[in-house]
């Protein structure tokens, strides 16, 4: 049996008609059953469970500021990963991370990079003013990322106003 273009169009319109009738007869979109993989729980119940299991405190998050998005485009992808790792592992409300041999080897192992790549990333981060430091002590630029409370960040920036004007 040969199908023509007209047959194709008629079949598609019939499908659209059947789907339209089905949707029209549904009383409410909330009549959908929640998939059994979620235990039949609503979105609100799932969200509440998640929040109960993962409490968030002021010191357990990292803030990313608009300056990061500007510098992010200039950084190498691996450098971005190193910056995020350093921010997660820095001191709360200070932004200082000490990259002595144990922390350095942990970063290299966790990110799966070589020592040469690590040093390239440090140069890239310094060149783009994402970090500052020498002798394995670095500070993450608080204009880009901050670990801790926002009020403490503002206080830090008031105490060190030259950070805003650097490069």
Image: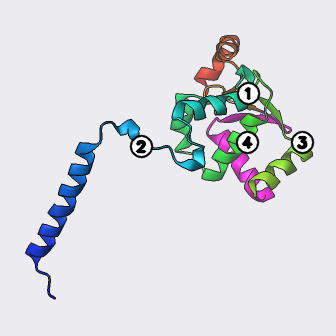
Cα separation, mark 4 vs mark 1, equals: 14 Å
Q: Which mark is residue 100?
A: 3
Q: Choose the circle earlier in sequence order: 2 or 1.
A: 2
Quadrant containing the C terminus is top right
Which residue is located at x 66 percent, y 52 percent?
78
Q: Position of residue 35 (x, y in %)?
A: 52, 48
Element at label 1: helix
Query: Disc 1 marks which residue?
Result: 60
Front-most of 151 and 15? Answer: 15
Badge 3, how many Cα within 10 Å: few under 14, some, many 20+?
few
> Which range of residues does the magenta coloring cover?
113-138
Q: Quadrant of residue 85?
A: top right
36 vs 66, nearest the viewer: 36
User: In screen coordinates, is 111 left or right of 66?
Assistant: right
How crowded pointer 1 is (Cα within 10 Å; few <14, some 14-19, many 20+) is rated as few
Residue receiving disc 2: 32
Placement of 28 over or under 117, stated as above or below = above
User: Mark 4 — residue?
Assistant: 85
Residue nearest the viewer, comparing 36 with 80: 36
């Amino acid at each position: 049996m040969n199908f023509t273009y007209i047959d194709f169009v008629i079949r598609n319109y019939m499908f659209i008609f059947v789907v339209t009738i089905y949707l029209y007869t549904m009383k409410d979109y909330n009549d959908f059953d929640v998939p059994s993989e979620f235990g039949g729980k609503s979105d609100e119940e799932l969200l509440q469970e998640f929040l109960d299991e993962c409490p968030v405190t002021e010191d357990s998050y990292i803030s990313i500021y608009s300056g990061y998005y500007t510098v992010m485009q200039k950084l190498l992808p691996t450098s971005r990963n190193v910056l995020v790792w350093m921010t997660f592992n820095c001191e709360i409300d200070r932004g200082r991370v000490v990259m002595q041999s144990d922390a350095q080897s942990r970063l290299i192992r966790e990110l799966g990079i070589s020592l040469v790549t690590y040093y390239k990333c440090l140069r890239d981060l310094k060149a783009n003013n994402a970090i500052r430091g020498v002798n394995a002590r670095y500070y993450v630029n608080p204009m880009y990322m901050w670990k801790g409370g926002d009020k403490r960040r503002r206080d830090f920036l008031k105490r060190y106003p030259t950070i805003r004007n650097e490069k």
